[in-house]
């Protein structure tokens, strides 16, 4: 099984990095072929060019070699894992840019009809989204309606053909104990392992 694992957090040593490392380690230990990307450390360029916004028939090739490599790679995955904090109800800019530049028409989906209904092209049938947050769950739901759930499980992943989307939120991180964080890392490993069954 080939799994892409994507981290979007700029600070080395963050809890998001620990989650990413645990997931990569777990999947490799289970014999998966893991392609792991720390998008910030690798300097993924998130900004769309003007040329990219004007075409509907993007191909795996792109002017930026890093973007082109990600486009080719994402088409080969059986599953995907995204690790990122909840910032303003959104993924960090680097991951938003990755979605906009990599999951493009001709790579991740094609428009199947004039009314805009897409046909997903990715072979990855499953995705796991692991978020950190400092907003308590009850407040998240009552005040904001859990925007990250809508982004991943309604707007992005089903559009490109990913039928099964699981999301887990670790909260609240800032006031968490070492013991709680250790429990969360074990949970992240279990969730990653579940992708393979």
Image (tube, rainbow, N blue to C red):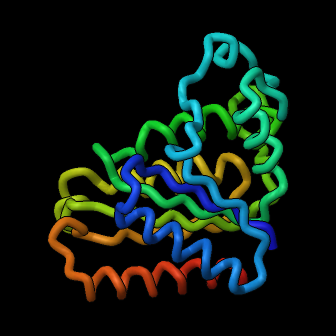
Residue nearest the observer in this picture, 7 or 114:
7
Location of residue 102 (image quadrant): top right
Location of residue 46 (image quadrant): top right
In the rendered image, residue 53, in percent from the top left (x then y), is placed at 64, 17
Residue ID at (49%, 39%): 94
Residue ID at (36%, 66%): 15
In the rendered image, residue 136, in percent from the top left (x then y), is placed at 19, 66
Residue ID at (54%, 80%): 191
Residue nearest the observer in this picture, 178 or 74:
178
Q: In this view, does 18 lie to the left or right of 95?
A: left
Residue ID at (79%, 49%): 73
Measured along the vertical axis of the image, is residue 112 above or below residue 58? Answer: below
In the rendered image, residue 100, in percent from the top left (x then y), is placed at 60, 33
In the rendered image, residue 76, in percent from the top left (x then y), is placed at 84, 55
Position of the C terminus by quadrant: bottom right
Position of the N terminus by quadrant: bottom right
Q: Does residue 141 appear in the picture of this structure?
A: no
Measured along the vertical axis of the image, is residue 77 above or below residue 1? Answer: above
């Amino acid at each position: 099984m080939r799994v892409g694992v994507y981290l979007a957090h700029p600070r080395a040593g963050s809890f998001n990095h620990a989650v990413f490392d645990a997931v990569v380690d777990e999947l490799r230990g289970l014999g998966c072929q893991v392609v792991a990307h720390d998008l910030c450390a690798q300097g993924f360029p998130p900004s769309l060019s003007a040329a990219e916004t004007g075409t509907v028939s993007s191909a795996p090739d792109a002017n930026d070699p890093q973007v082109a490599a990600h486009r080719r790679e994402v088409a080969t995955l059986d599953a995907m894992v995204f690790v990122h904090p909840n910032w303003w109800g959104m993924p960090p800019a680097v991951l938003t840019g990755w979605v906009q530049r990599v999951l493009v028409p001709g790579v991740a989906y094609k428009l199947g009809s004039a009314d805009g209904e897409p046909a997903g092209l990715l072979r990855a049938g499953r995705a796991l989204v692991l978020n950190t947050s400092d907003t308590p769950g009850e407040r998240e739901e009552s005040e904001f309606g859990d925007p990250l759930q809508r982004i991943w499980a309604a707007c992005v992943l089903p559009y490109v053909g990913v039928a099964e989307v699981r999301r887990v939120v670790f909260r609240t991180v800032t006031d968490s104990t070492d013991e709680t964080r250790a429990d969360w890392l074990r949970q992240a490993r279990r969730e990653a392992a579940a992708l393979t069954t």
